[in-house]
Amino acid sequence: MLFVAVVGVLTNHCFAQTDSIFKFQKAISYPIASFTVNNLGELYIINTNNQLKKLNEKGDSVGVFNQVTKYGKLSYVDAQNPWKTILFYENFSTIVLLDKYLNVLTNINLRKQNIFGVKTVAASYDNNIWLFDEQENKLKKIDDAGKVLTETIDFRLLFDSVPSPVQIVDRDGFVYLYDPQKGVYIFDYYGSFKNKIPFHGWKNIAVIEKNLYGFDDTYLYRYGLGTLSLAQYSLPVVFKNYTSLKVGANKIYFLKNSNLQVYSLQ
């Protein structure tokens, strides 16, 4: 089982460690409150005036959305699908969908669809939306109208302790649900449970080129999903007390004091 193999990596082989993989590339002089990045290196920045701006890999603005607070406080932005950006407002159980230029496509009131207790949503590979329904304890896929297309069985029938995922990632044929207290739960696109990886306490996860990345206050972790090897890299001192840290397109993006810096991962 993968779970056993991972434990073996952690206990018997310790960590491979390299401290010189971070190389400064550029800083973005812009008052940033929060951000996300996709695997193409496109940045989605919310400035201190609650304006959402999309920047391409060259740093050029390719879209602006000014109605960020229309549905209350924005919980987060999911940009896994570069053609459709997802804004999620947890307190109002509302999803707003934007096109590649950040024009509004539609919005979904989850309560009207009888879906309650949602903390995280994400784009699916087929241009739909994944979410975890904490009331029914199911991973569900919905369309742009909020209609449920597929769903798993009740997680209480699968696990002794039901996870409460804070992040969902769809990548390369699998869906990853991350609960910082319990680990990473992996499902296939049909909703069948495949494995659990016992990585706890990470701030963010990303899956890029068959590697699972995560952070804590001290290290960047990279786990090879095919090789079952785990490496940890000490974060540079300048990263201390970061606001947000994310991986995308072989780069690491570091937000601190409203300033964003970009480092390459060698």
Image: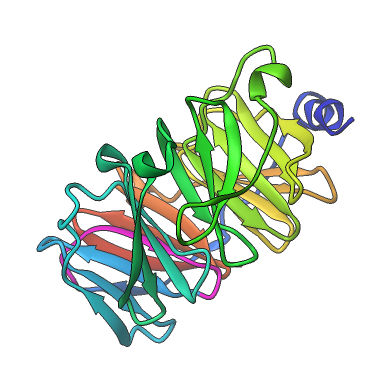
The one nearer the camera, 163 or 103, is 103
Which span is picked out in magenta?
Answer: 30-40
Tell me if I can see residue 217 in this picture: no
Q: Residue furthest top?
A: 160
Picture quadrant of residue 211: bottom right
Q: Position of residue 217 (x, y in %)?
A: 42, 37
The one nearer the camera, 38 or 63, is 63
Q: Position of residue 229 (x, y in %)?
A: 79, 44
Picture quadrant of residue 32: bottom left
Q: Is residue 132 above or below residue 162?
A: below
Picture quadrant of residue 193: top right
- 211 is within the stretch colored magenta: no
Q: Tell me the quarter of the image containing the N terminus.
A: top right
Q: Is residue 46 above or below residue 169?
A: below
Q: Which residue occupies 56% across, 61% down? A: 128
Tell me if I can see residue 95 in this picture: yes
Q: Which residue occupies 48% across, 44% down? A: 204
The one nearer the camera, 129 or 36, is 129
> Is 230 left, or right, of 76 in this rendering?
right
Number of on-image labels: 0
> Is 204 left, or right, of 161 in this rendering?
left
- 37 is within the stretch colored magenta: yes
Q: Which residue occupies 67% across, 35% down? A: 185
Q: Position of residue 233 (x, y in %)?
A: 58, 47
Q: Which residue occupies 19% across, 58% down? A: 258
Q: Tell me the quarter of the image containing the C terminus.
A: bottom right
Q: How is the image coloured?
A: rainbow
> Is 115 left, or right, of 243 in this rendering?
right
